[in-house]
Image (spheres, rainbow, N blue to C red):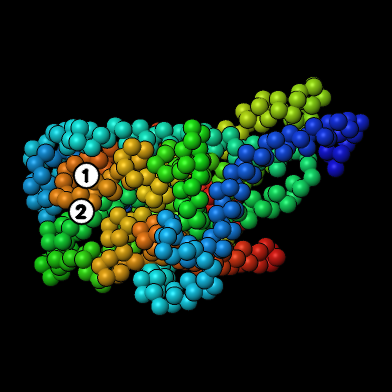
Amino acid sequence: MAKTSATYSFSYRIRKAIGAWIKYLVMIILAIFFLFPIVFMIVSSFKENELQVISDMSSLNALLPVGELGIQNYKDIFTSLDFGHLMFNSVFIMLITVISGLLVNSLIAYALARLQFKGKGILLGIVIALIIIPFEAVAIPLLLFVNKLPWFGGARSWLDTYHVQIIPFIADAFSIFLFYQFFVNIPKELEEAALIDGASLFGIFWKIILPLSKPIFATVAILQALASWNRFMWPLMVTRGPGVRPLTVGIQSFFGQDPRLWGDLMAFSSMITIPVLILFLLFQKWFVQSVASTGIKG
Amino acid sequence: MADNRRTKGFPTFRKKESLLAWLFSTPAIVLLIVFLIIPFVWAIYLSFTNQRLIPNLNIPTEIVGFRNYIRLFEDEAFLRGLLNNFYFVAVVVPIQTLLALGLAILINQELKGMNIFRTIYFGPVVTAMTVVAIVWTFLYNPGEGLINAFLNAISLGNLGPYDWLLDTKLVFPAIMFLSIWQGVGFQMIIYLAGLQEIPSSLYEAAQVDGANKWQQFTNITIPQLRNTTIFVLLSTTILAFKLFDQVKVMTNGGPQNASMTTMVHVVEMGWGQLKVGYASAISIIFFLIVLGVSVIQQSIMKEKGSES
């Protein structure tokens, strides 16, 4: 009796161990699948010999740091392409879009969620309905529109500017909706206590709602920042030269030049990707939470 | 109700509150009107005109009725693009959804090192699609590209080499493949959130009843993930109709329109050829498709709500 139960648990343990190993094997194979292009990109960016980059492609050497290694490709993109300027453009556009977006979208969401005013229901309905209209559907009329829009200082067009890449993306119906959902669930008692203590409505927003709402601000900031960093179609259409162009359009334009310098291209790609990957590794929890929040709860 | 009580005896308070609400709302309202609602309404109008991005003095801008819409049916690039979008939906949406579910179940296990795997699977999502497109163009290099080398090695020399991006039959599947690689981590996280919301008591009860893992999966996991699945399926479908970045960078719709998509065609017509009126008509068709998918999503999800 004792013996059978011992053998049972022994074989059970073995089966469990084998099961775990199979799971790990599957997960490692999948990890290789998701990692290899990124490893390939980074490894190739350090290979200084352009011919070697290409010849390594037909073997595992593509993924290994072999041959003449160095940072020449990185030097190239900073000198011949003015990578620094493109990077500045992308960071600048992203920061201004995200910061003003957080302010504008959280304010209207706060009004919709916490304040009483006429037309509130209709306004909320309109904002939610607007989520359905994708930017892609209005891009072409908007292009025609910004082409003729004046700006301070007598400019007659918004083309080739920073603001044309920022202002259309500040207000975002989906971000408003995310803020709204969060604000509406904050307990009312906190505000009421503050009101009795004589706090102003703006004071309540600033001192009570904002500190409680860090998670939703982080969520919206990450979603907007990723969207801005990766945005491609719109800046492609509204920028003509490298002056105000973001990295995405810069690399596409460099990619279109003959002959293709793969080492430089991989250095360029790595420089776009690595900062975001580092931020992702540091704030992983927030990234994952942001993405999860885009799914509608059942 | 509570608000009425709160503001009783403060007639000016209500007024102030209302004023503040509009003050808070105005920036967003103005921006949404100017950059979303007006362009959208304008797109509908423009789609009935022959408006050009830069007016051509020889062709006065005028209303042309349904001419743009009628022309769509004779426009091979448009039809090919739309067909490709449906092709993408038919292939990528089911594969990506199943893969995302599988990955979510894998990383939801309580094994050591799970965080590392989650990080790795999600990594491509934070990589810009333009970068992904360039790296994969290199991987798909005809002749001695890494993908060709890999296929050659595992098939013992029987497969390849293929001209991935130059072959009209292979180019679109090649783009689909990298799209799944880049995008699946996103849906994986949404599924993971869905999995973690399932009450563990359901599984405990099933174990007491003697249900095996597979029965638990089909009788608890799948039904509990119903709304998540609907969301993933339909949001991926909408993304499929927006397909642009990778195609623009890798092939610009070629060769011979084999990888054309609706959005690539919109940009080519409106920005490349300056035909804003015609491009607007395509944008409207694109919007109607997205609207249709969203309406389906809403109605299926509501159905569930009334059942339970």
Q: Which amino acid is tagged 2?
A: Phe
Which residue position holds label 1? A265
Q: Mark 1 lies on which chain?
A: A
Toward the front, the furthest residue is B58
Task: Find out whether the residues at labels 2 and 1 contact each other: C-beta distance under 8 Å.
Answer: yes
Residue at screen point 70% across, 43% down:
A112
Q: In this view, does A195 lie to the left or right of B151?
A: right
In depth, the one of A61 and B145 nearer the eye is B145
Residue at screen point 31% across, 42% down:
A241
Residue at screen point 12% across, 70% down:
B158
> What x and y, as percent, mark residue B232?
50, 59
Q: Mark 2 lies on which chain?
A: B
State which quarter of the image contains the N terminus of chain A.
bottom left
**Vertical order, A37 against A274 (above or below):** below
Residue neighbourhood size for the residue with mark 1, other residues' Cα within 10 Å, grouped as few (<14), some (14–19), many (≥20): many
Q: Is residue A196 left or right of residue B34?
A: right
Q: Distance between the residues labelled 2 and 1?
A: 10 Å
> What x and y, as percent, mark residue B102?
41, 58
State which quarter of the image contains the C terminus of chain A.
bottom right
In depth, the one of B47 and A155 nearer the eye is A155
Toward the right, the furthest residue is B9
Residue neighbourhood size for the residue with mark 2, other residues' Cα within 10 Å, grouped as few (<14), some (14–19), many (≥20): many
Report whether mark 2 lies on the same chain as mark 1. Answer: no
Q: In this view, does A191 lie to the left or right of B74?
A: right
**Residue A14 makes an appearance in the image:** no
Which residue position holds label 2? B138
> What x and y, as percent, mark residue B141?
17, 58
Q: Which amino acid is tagged 1?
A: Leu
> What x and y, as percent, mark residue B234?
51, 63
Q: Is residue B86 left or right of residue B166?
A: right
